[in-house]
Amino acid sequence: GKGCLLCILVLTLVPAAVSAQDGAGSTGAGYLLLPVGPRSISLGEVNCALPGDPFNWQFNPATLHTISGVGFGFSHTEWIVDTRYENVSLHYRWGDKLALGAALTYLYRPEIQGFDEFGIETESLRSNNYRAVLGLGFTPLEALTAGVNVKYFRETLADWSAGGAAFDIGALLDIDRLNLAIGLAVQNIGQDISFDSIDEPLPLTMRFGASHEAVNHDSDIKLLIAADLVKQRYEDLYFCGGAEIEIHNAVAIRAGYSAQESRTGNGFTAGGGFRVHERIMMDYAW
């Protein structure tokens, strides 16, 4: 495809919390589940089968190869309890068989008041974490893409810190004659991490999803429907999905729903965006 520079400026507001693990056990490094990309978030946080989305490869690396040319994306998220996080993403399509990606997410919270054993206030404590991702997408067959992400992550609270490495694997089958994409991804594969001598497993997540696009050429309107089935460690299987209407390849309106039980809020999401220029898109998600 023709190479192009895609600059995406995003303002994202997400009231949903990353899952608070309960039940038979708990996981560490829950921030690995932080959603990024306003399109995915506003469609109920689906991210298994969204071809062409410039952020989505961070969760299913197979979608990396569906993005043409060179691209850059930035998102800012206002999250719960005055917590914020930023994501920067780069991707590069190298010929017909290979695509590369790199991304960084940095989360920061307000300082936490410290106390000593007598309940007297001490200095404020800082808390932040980050994850860095390198992705590779390739096309073993004409309609099939595959990919792998390698990620490094670290969390810091005052003088304590913990981190490690993990990887994701994914596949995407594109059925052109049906305008249908089917995806499969396994996320956060890796060893347990230790924080202050407590060992916890990573939030291993398995996803199976699909998306379908219908186009009305007379009115130049596109309708996209996408859905995922998700199984996270220590959580029940749940559904998430959404729909997008795009008009004249310029304006998009989106809505979605996530049925995850531990998710904060009522599960509904929404958003939209517009194309400022052929190479520039701006999006918002709630």
Image (spheres, rainbow, N blue to C red):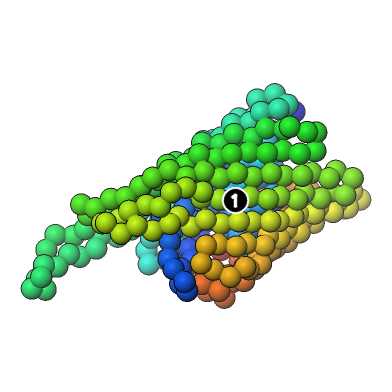
Q: Is residue 248 left or right of residue 28?
A: right
Residue nearer the viewer, 277 or 91:
91
Report the label total: 1
Percent of width and height locating residue 207: 64, 56
Q: Amino acid at mark 1?
A: Val
Percent of width and height locating residue 129: 36, 50
Q: Which residue is mark 1?
A: 186
User: Which of the 4 image quadrants contains residue 238?
Assistant: bottom right
Q: Is residue 201 above or below residue 103?
A: below
Percent of width and height locating residue 122: 11, 63
User: Which of the 4 image quadrants contains residue 117?
Assistant: bottom left
Q: Is residue 154 left or right of residue 142?
A: left
Label 1 Cα crowd, 10 Å radius (few <14 / some 14-19 / many 20+): many
Residue placed at 35% from the left, 47% from the top? 163
Q: Secondary structure at mark 1?
A: strand
Percent of width and height locating residue 47: 63, 53
Q: In the orientation shown, which residue stands out farthest toward the right? A: 218
Residue placed at 55% from the left, 62% from the top? 232
Where, quadrant-wise, is the C terminus in this rendering? bottom right
Answer whether residue 257 is visible to the viewer in this image.
yes
Answer whether residue 106 is visible to the viewer in this image.
no
Where, quadrant-wise, is the N terminus in this rendering? top right
Residue placed at 89% from the left, 45% from the top? 177
Q: Is residue 158 left or right of residue 253?
A: left
Q: Is residue 107 above or below residue 97?
A: below
